[in-house]
Amino acid sequence: MGRTVFTAIALLWSVSFCGAQTAPRARDLGVPFEGTPGPLNAITDVKGVEVGHTTLISGEGELKVGVGPVRTGVTAVLPRGRESSDPVFAGWFTENGNGEMTGTTWVEESGFLEGPVMITNTHSVGVVRDAVIAWRVKKGQPKDSEYWWSLPVVAETWDGWLNDVNGFHVHPEHVFAALDNARPGPVAEGNVGGGTGMVCYEFKGGIGTASRKIPERKGGYTVGVLLQCNHGSRHELRVAGAPVGREIPEQPAYGRDNGSIIVVVATDAPLLPHQMKRIARRATLGLGRNGSTAGNGSGDIFIAFSTANPGAFDAKKTTRPEMMSNDQLDPLFEATVQAVEEAEINALVAAKTMVGIRNHRVIALPHDRLRAVLEKYRRLGN
Amino acid sequence: MGRTVFTAIALLWSVSFCGAQTAPRARDLGVPFEGTPGPLNAITDVKGVEVGHTTLISGEGELKVGVGPVRTGVTAVLPRGRESSDPVFAGWFTENGNGEMTGTTWVEESGFLEGPVMITNTHSVGVVRDAVIAWRVKKGQPKDSEYWWSLPVVAETWDGWLNDVNGFHVHPEHVFAALDNARPGPVAEGNVGGGTGMVCYEFKGGIGTASRKIPERKGGYTVGVLLQCNHGSRHELRVAGAPVGREIPEQPAYGRDNGSIIVVVATDAPLLPHQMKRIARRATLGLGRNGSTAGNGSGDIFIAFSTANPGAFDAKKTTRPEMMSNDQLDPLFEATVQAVEEAEINALVAAKTMVGIRNHRVIALPHDRLRAVLEKYRRLGN
Amino acid sequence: MGRTVFTAIALLWSVSFCGAQTAPRARDLGVPFEGTPGPLNAITDVKGVEVGHTTLISGEGELKVGVGPVRTGVTAVLPRGRESSDPVFAGWFTENGNGEMTGTTWVEESGFLEGPVMITNTHSVGVVRDAVIAWRVKKGQPKDSEYWWSLPVVAETWDGWLNDVNGFHVHPEHVFAALDNARPGPVAEGNVGGGTGMVCYEFKGGIGTASRKIPERKGGYTVGVLLQCNHGSRHELRVAGAPVGREIPEQPAYGRDNGSIIVVVATDAPLLPHQMKRIARRATLGLGRNGSTAGNGSGDIFIAFSTANPGAFDAKKTTRPEMMSNDQLDPLFEATVQAVEEAEINALVAAKTMVGIRNHRVIALPHDRLRAVLEKYRRLGN
Amino acid sequence: MGRTVFTAIALLWSVSFCGAQTAPRARDLGVPFEGTPGPLNAITDVKGVEVGHTTLISGEGELKVGVGPVRTGVTAVLPRGRESSDPVFAGWFTENGNGEMTGTTWVEESGFLEGPVMITNTHSVGVVRDAVIAWRVKKGQPKDSEYWWSLPVVAETWDGWLNDVNGFHVHPEHVFAALDNARPGPVAEGNVGGGTGMVCYEFKGGIGTASRKIPERKGGYTVGVLLQCNHGSRHELRVAGAPVGREIPEQPAYGRDNGSIIVVVATDAPLLPHQMKRIARRATLGLGRNGSTAGNGSGDIFIAFSTANPGAFDAKKTTRPEMMSNDQLDPLFEATVQAVEEAEINALVAAKTMVGIRNHRVIALPHDRLRAVLEKYRRLGN
């Protein structure tokens, strides 16, 4: 039984080739959202941001630890793309800490995110972390003769319902692939990358993305969100305020809130580290709109960064980073809440029914049913 | 122009006398909420909790600083009632810190809330704080000859749109009255106590309360919420998922998110301090359901306490407080989110149109319009 | 029995007139400290910083609550002086939270300290807080017709061993006096202002100050510290590493760690808010050098601000504040630790034996004994 | 050039066989410390705690990345020993966050440390983390068919001055060895385990340990500390208050504060999670006594746990953990500060001169010189 590695290249190809026609997103189905998205309605609307996925799917049926079935992967978000090692201002927040995001102690202390944000499964955080360092070392940043620390940011959610999580199927080469294949442009959603084996409101979950463009008179900035959703009890799910989970109760995956959700927020707005924390904290409100109660088993961990102020991390001299006033932040807060809300519904809409270990089957959110519920509650396209 | 002091006695009298008949609450109007409330659907469903209000309303028309118009007050929440000085386990959280809640440094450090939670206007936090100490000293707790610290918890929201906030109209006697008149039983809502002059989603806001009873098989505990709401932009308001703010756009108070919201969560569930913080943090999710984006100008500060474990604060010896397991907390998290969601709508439903300084007029949420919007979106009673 | 108000004017006068001759400071006694102080070896070496004290001393003998004896006061630290209302970047930290520092929730959220830092006794935090707002209102900042919030920073330590703390002897006029009389230049130490009735390592404590000047090649910045010390058990006290508390065991005030210590750090170094938190956190290390173990009863709360970047708080537009790199901060960290260490010993050296309520007597650290101990341990002037 | 693996077994053997005679500890040299240590003066004085080291030393001379020289390892601290998977109450704190300690988000949220604390080099955190999960899976805890999360606690300091850190020489088998060989009893110090290649105050550093026993009338509890020290500038080092770094300036490793320090505090005192955080925060004060200023490059991260209250982590029901009152904690705070102070000096005294990559040579703190300095400052044995 061979393992198949779908790299980001392959996935992006399919998206760019046929995405719009065959893969409707939430607003294509008539889900009404507030605010104005960017051209891609994706985190990559924030200029410079690149995303790469490595998706690992192989095997079927009985669980044989170390063999499969495998339903997992790695997602890489690079704030300034593959070619830059210039850190970005960042902040993080945890609404419920039953999860891991490495590297955050230094983000909090320094105000900088010095590399990519990686997302994978719970048992592969370590291999991904060290592989990010190895990738940097390979690229010669910095010279290996210099004193330098390495504190990568790697987050996780648990895919052990569908994936042979104890088989440790993510290897360094998968991490390198996700990083090397990261690209701007459309972002694959659903059962891809770190989100491959995830479950959300007991439907199939995974990766989702969305963006908002602030009006020019308020700065014209963009906020982009990418999230890996793996949380929620079915009955809680609301879509645009409609009680979708209550209306589609069938085939819940487990019967309780078992997972986690990782949210990455990017913006080109010139914010300082303490302001990035404020942005990160708003993710909770977006999740709240979709019905979350942040169950005990959930690692609801968020990180936000700004691509503004290139060069602010200059060890040798003082710099003059641009800073918005606190009084100017409301449009960005609103954009963050809206983009988180939509990105999660996008993940649910994109994900496809999956069968994993022990023949566990997790159904996709049925598009027709979703439309019917929105229709019932007068929210279809409204 | 005389100042009229409506004390908690007076207000509770009116409530107990005619409340149910004449003052419908949100669910009386057909707003659908999840979960099961306690008998009073109030924070006082948590046994031992007492609430007192002092409401200060006097004057009309032109602002004369130090004279009026006065539209303010003080609300007191006493975890174990007036007769007990036994501290409770507590935790706090701030979603957006443009506000004050004194005493929280010691709550965080010690795990205990040692006295009442007071809520007033922004410029009266100090007088209320010192008056709480004076009230304790008067009651002889502890002996005045003993070493003892005094770090009262006092929170605020800003009522300067309607109230002569620079006139400093709250005096120590008003604080004593709120404390002395605190009672179990029904809790007055709307334009009372600290909430007298508040504005919420640009409708008239103020004090709201609600509760949830957990099923017996999950422990049978109660979660009660009292909040003072003074935040939100009109267009953001959702009620039970329906876009009420968008549907009732007229006469917004200011045109932006200008205020704050203080949330007090009480429970009889046996939780330790670090677990109380987890409860406090869930308030954000309840506010998210109602549409909040936590604007820069908002002090969204929450405190949660448990009335379980009397006697846990015994300076002289070890104790054995009861602790729920983290795995048992989900029903409490859900209850907290639900009670916060409902308490805020209760505040909006209870508050009445008010005219304050400079003839600023803030309209109440019109009940008929609310029902009409819910009807439109098929959420009336559903 | 009349109350005597010694205002900052009077105290500063005595200092400027005869200070150097008659009031030796710690290094005048031969205590060796690391680093290079500024010209005044005071927080006012940071340009713009002004300090004012109101000292309240009256009555003797028996305690009559509300009458006296009174041994208390208020200290005001104004980051940019009385004439400026331009906020400064700031951060705070608490090593042990048995105390109060109001306004810190907004400091943490916004990154700004918008007014003075006030220090007083535990039971007067409220009156001082509201009086700071009243003082601003009186000065017409901002126009009373504008929406504006007011979240003053007021800290405390408990002086109930010497002072009639339940008598609430600090009144608004004392607060106004401390603010109005704030000045640059030498800073009175010991039994003055908020420090009047304080006890430190069971010697008489109070206000202390010190500063460090960073070498020009490392930026040439200044770090200044002012603290109000009221903590520590006698046996713990170390001075320049010598076990002074163990060597001078007589007449301890209480026999245990009963108090608190508030530290204010000022700098002209261009640091962002998250960097100011890093500075604040270093105060612990300075206190550690003097032997602190941060007892349960101690409110060890620190705030740090930067006078660089005037105009950074401009609500209407983006700004470009100057920021040192994190890699440049070590000299500032070292300066902070050193200045905190020295400021506390300065407080002990300046304070004079005081008799307060119930004839409680707290002895000053005897200068000759201090010198003898340093001599014994070869640290006198070394 | 073969790699040599010294496992914990081998090292402990040498310690138990000849330790007392040939390996003096700090107090054997006459360094005076406050307080009373436990029988081993080690973290293992806290009953149940087991420690294992895997030490990797091989190669000399030129750096060949991936080959060597290797000067690194792994240290495991198991709160209840290898045979127990019963979590312990815990809390953590970071004085300066230029480092990593994985798993802390869940420690903070849940109040529990669910497995061992591992310490290694910066670039091996990932492999150690995943290997801890693999070790648990191998042991069948919990059943692999169950839903279960895995958030190991792994900390690091950077050994790239002596070790081929980019060679990633720590492998899963080294992690398993450290865990499997963990034992109660004496703990090897200095160039062992995770501390193998570390540098402290520019002398050779590494692992150090110490303990304190609280008097019976104050509870009779034990506090044990194990730390991995890799921080500090030479001139800052104080030993028992004497300026040792200034007096022994020769052959400093780098000329600045370059490293980190990880502190693990164990106690059998019955403390709740929020109280464990209070304990963790005291580590700063112990480091302050030794002269630390917590440089920007330092990851000063501390974790504290209590072995009291076995069974408190019972997912299915409420429990009644024992809790000391906050008023009883001062002896534990003092013990923590004292044990941290001594453990670091123990590490310096135990570590031996080491030559690593590029022939970098880091000298041990010379015992005779240390004694001479203490003699000079009248602290030898005093």
Image: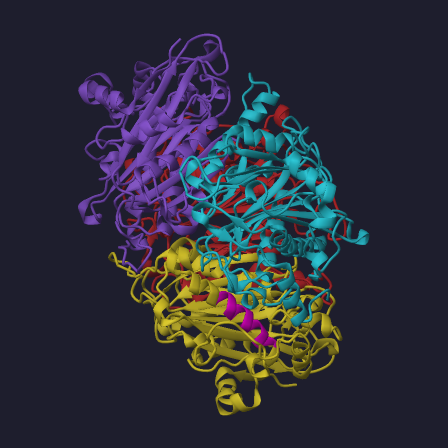
Chain colours: A cyan, B yellow, C red, D purple
Residue D63: x and y in percent read: 49, 11
Residue D163 in which image quadrant = top left
Q: Nearer the viewer, residue B147 or B316?
A: B316
Q: Is residue B337 magenta?
A: yes
Per the picture, the main secondary structure of the magenta-coloured stretch is helix
Residue B24's place in the image compared with A93, above or below, is below
Question: Quadrant where the N terminus of chain B lies?
Answer: bottom right
Residue D375: x and y in percent read: 29, 20
Residue D75 located left or right of residue B178: left
Q: Nearer the viewer, residue D35 or A183?
A: A183
Residue D299's place in the image compared with D219, above or below, is above
Residue A338 shows in the view: yes
Residue A140: x and y in percent read: 61, 20
Residue B246 located left or right of residue B30: right
Residue A187 located left or right of residue B83: right
Q: Is residue B332 magenta?
A: no
Question: Quadrant where the C terminus of chain B lies?
Answer: bottom right
What residue is rendered at 75% in x and 48% in y? A221
Residue D364 in which image quadrant = top left
Residue A277's place in the image compared with D295, above or below, is below
Residue C363: x and y in percent read: 35, 47
What residue is rendered at 45% in x and 14% in y? D68
Magenta-tinted stretch:
B336-348
Residue C244 in which image quadrant = top left
Q: Nearer the viewer, residue C228 or D223?
A: D223
Q: How many marks?
A: 0
What residue is rendered at 39% in x and 31% in y? D119
Q: Nearer the viewer, residue A2 or D377?
A: A2
Residue C376 shows in the view: no
